[in-house]
């Protein structure tokens, strides 16, 4: 029996999409014919792939077997055992902050409103500021993003020939970034659940 370690996310109330209560250690079984996205037990080999389908913030490490179909970012199987779960709500907020910081650095955005919004999010997570203060920082960052987008659009219009080279490099860069962020999120969750 070949097993695959995978990731699955469930609703914040700890229930599966069909309403069953999630139980650590339990093996869930679906008999009969399986259909991707319709019938069967789904999971993903990579945590970010699974996160795309998350109905909530509860992350599950699962062991799957009797895989029937597999696509690039998910598979459907007959049997899935829940090894452990973790409420990743705060980790997902911090993960978003880290990704945003890296994106700003790569884009060479130095507008302090953007950095202040990330810092405000971290303060909000610690309970140091309230929702309205966070909203104000987010609005200021939105203004900064619109300003930066306008500048970028004008620069792109001046250099349309560079678009083809950017498209070719962009796909490779996206794949590399996805793999890096996948490893980062996995590490953050595993380290914080201890």
Image (cartoon, helix red, strand yellow):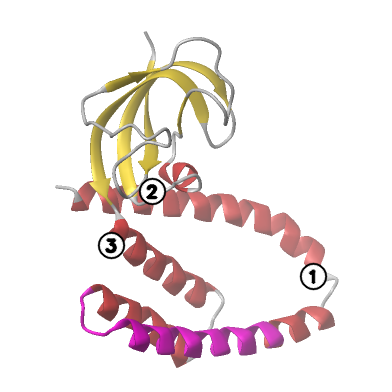
Q: Nearer the viewer, residue 67 or 181?
A: 67
Q: Name the residue under label 2.
A: 183
**Lower sequence index among marks 3 and 1:** 3
Q: Locate residue 100 relative to residue 156 in the image: left or right.
A: left
Q: Locate residue 179 relative to residue 70 in the image: left or right.
A: left
Q: Position of residue 151 (x, y in %)?
A: 69, 88
Question: What secondary structure is marked by label 1?
Answer: helix
Q: Name the residue under label 1.
A: 162
Circle 3 residues within 10 Å: few <14, some 14–19, many ≥20: some
Task: Give the tally of numbered discs.
Answer: 3
Q: Which of 184 and 122 is in front in this view?
A: 122
Q: Residue 90 carries which label?
A: 3
What kind of secondary structure does the magenta stretch mostly adopt?
A: helix
Label 3, label 2: how far apart the Cα atoms are: 17 Å
Q: Give the range drawn in magenta.
A: 126-150
Which numbered disc, 1 or 2, marks the residue closer to the eye? 2
Q: Where is residue 163 in the image (x, y as percent from the top left)?
A: 79, 67
Quarter residue 1 falls in: top left
Question: Looking at the image, which residue is at 38% across and 48% down?
Answer: 183
Label 3, label 1: how far apart the Cα atoms are: 39 Å
Which numbered disc, 3 or 2, marks the residue closer to the eye? 3
Q: Does 135 appear in magenta?
A: yes
Question: What secondary structure is marked by label 3?
Answer: helix
Q: Locate residue 185 relative to residue 142 in the image: left or right.
A: left
């Amino acid at each position: 029996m070949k097993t695959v370690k995978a990731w699955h996310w469930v609703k914040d109330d700890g229930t599966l999409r069909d309403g069953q209560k999630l139980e650590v250690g339990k093996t869930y079984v679906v008999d009969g014919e399986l259909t991707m996205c319709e019938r069967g037990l789904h999971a993903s080999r990579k945590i970010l792939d699974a996160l795309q389908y998350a109905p909530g913030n509860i992350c599950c490490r699962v062991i799957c077997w009797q895989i029937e179909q597999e696509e690039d970012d998910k598979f459907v199987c007959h049997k899935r055992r829940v090894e452990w779960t973790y409420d990743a709500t705060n980790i997902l907020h911090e993960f978003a902050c880290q990704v945003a910081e890296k994106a700003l650095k790569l884009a060479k955005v130095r507008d302090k409103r953007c950095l202040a919004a990330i810092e405000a999010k971290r303060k909000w997570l610690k309970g140091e500021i309230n929702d309205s203060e966070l909203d104000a920082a987010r609005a200021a960052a939105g203004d900064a993003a619109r300003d930066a987008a306008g500048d970028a659009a004008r620069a792109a219009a001046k250099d349309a020939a560079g678009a083809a080279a950017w498209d070719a490099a962009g796909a490779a860069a996206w794949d590399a970034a996805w793999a890096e962020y996948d490893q980062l999120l996995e590490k953050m969750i595993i380290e914080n659940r201890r």
